[in-house]
Amino acid sequence: MTASLAMVSLDCPDPQALAAFYAELLGWKVAASEHEYAMITDEGSAPIGFGRVEGYTAPEWSPDSADAKRYHLDFYVDDLDGGEARALELGATKPEFQPDPGWRVLLDPAGHPFCLCVRRG
């Protein structure tokens, strides 16, 4: 028996705000938006959920941090500069450390790292 991905869930301090950020970034629909939990969906993709965690602390994004990131999301864009500009406009931030010029590492409004890369072929 094999498993299939049902959903990705992110801990955060403000589920409604983070769902709105990712819905705008990805062009998805906010399917649920409550104080404790929110979710975005797109047909054919596993939903992304956002759960409130009191005292949430964002992971560190640096090459030598003892509290390094534990995961990140990768997103395709057609234009790397344009995708970065849009994400920054929506509230993302760009950390100084960028490991590869073919990817852009950004932080969502709750501090989760995510990467943008150019869609190929």
Image (cartoon, rainbow, N blue to C red):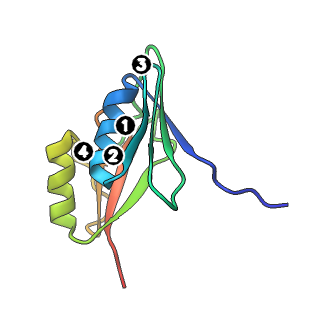
Residue 72 point in image, percent of width and height: 45, 49
Q: Quadrant of the N terminus?
A: bottom right
Q: Are marks 3 and 1 in contact (CB under 8 Å)?
A: no
Q: What crowding class fits label 4: few (fewer than 14 Cα within 10 Å), some (14-19), or many (20 or more)?
A: few
Q: CA distance from mark 3 to mark 1?
A: 11 Å
Residue 39 point in image, percent of width and height: 46, 37
> Any mark on residue 95, and which?
4
Q: Secondary structure at mark 1?
A: helix
Say which amino acid is labelled 1. Answer: Ala
Report the front residue among 105 and 91: 91
Q: CA distance from mark 4 to mark 1?
A: 21 Å
Q: Are marks 4 and 3 in contact (CB under 8 Å)?
A: no
Please give the name of the residue rendered at 34% of the width and 34% of the height, measured from the top-left corner. 18
Say which amino acid is labelled 2. Answer: Ala
Q: What crowding class fits label 2: few (fewer than 14 Cα within 10 Å), some (14-19), or many (20 or more)?
A: some
Does label 4 or label 1 sit earlier along the sequence?
Answer: 1
Report the front residue among 93 and 89: 89
Q: CA distance from mark 4 to mark 3?
A: 29 Å
Q: Which residue is mark 2?
A: 23
